[in-house]
Image: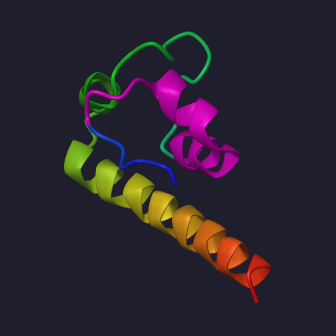
């Protein structure tokens, strides 16, 4: 299970968690090359983005990934 993302999570940590989260970050135009050590909060402030909205979007992806994993695990026991 992937833990919810927090505003102090670094872009690098988010990207390394799952490829779908990396894609979600790229859609916001974050510099995922040179600024990946920045926290999500700092990266949002630099781009004038609402960190709460970005967190909500990223954590929705986390919930989807976790639900898919739960279904796969449950289906193995059927």
The foreground one among 49 and 64 is: 64
Is 50 part of what is drawn in magenta? no
| Visible residue check, residue 24 | yes
Tell me which residue sits at (48%, 13%) in the image: 35
Magenta range: 7-27
- Residue 23 shown left or right of residue 56 in the figure: right
Tell me which residue sits at (51%, 17%) in the image: 36
Residue 18, image x and y in percent?
64, 44
- Residue 7 shown left or right of residue 63 in the figure: left
Tell me which residue sits at (72%, 74%) in the image: 72
The foreground one among 59 and 52 is: 59
Q: Quadrant of the C terminus?
A: bottom right
User: Vertical placement of 78 versus 23: above or below?
Assistant: below
State which quadrant residue 22 falls in. top right
The foreground one among 45 and 73 is: 73
Is 21 part of what is drawn in magenta? yes
User: Vertical placement of 32 versus 28: above or below?
Assistant: above
Q: Residue furthest bottom?
A: 78
Residue 1, image x and y in percent?
52, 54
State which quadrant residue 74 falls in. bottom right
| Visible residue check, residue 30 | no
Q: Main secondary structure of the magenta part?
A: helix
Residue 64, image x and y in percent?
53, 69
State which quadrant residue 9 falls in. top left
Residue 73, image x and y in percent?
68, 71
- Residue 36 shown left or right of residue 51 in the figure: right
């Amino acid at each position: 299970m992937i833990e919810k993302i927090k505003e102090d999570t670094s872009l690098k940590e988010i990207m390394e968690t799952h490829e779908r989260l990396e894609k979600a970050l790229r859609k916001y135009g974050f510099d995922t090359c040179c600024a990946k050590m920045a926290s999500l909060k700092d990266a949002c402030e630099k781009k004038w983005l609402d960190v709460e909205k970005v967190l909500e979007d990223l954590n929705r992806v986390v919930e989807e990934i976790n639900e898919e994993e739960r279904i796969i695990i449950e289906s193995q026991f059927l």
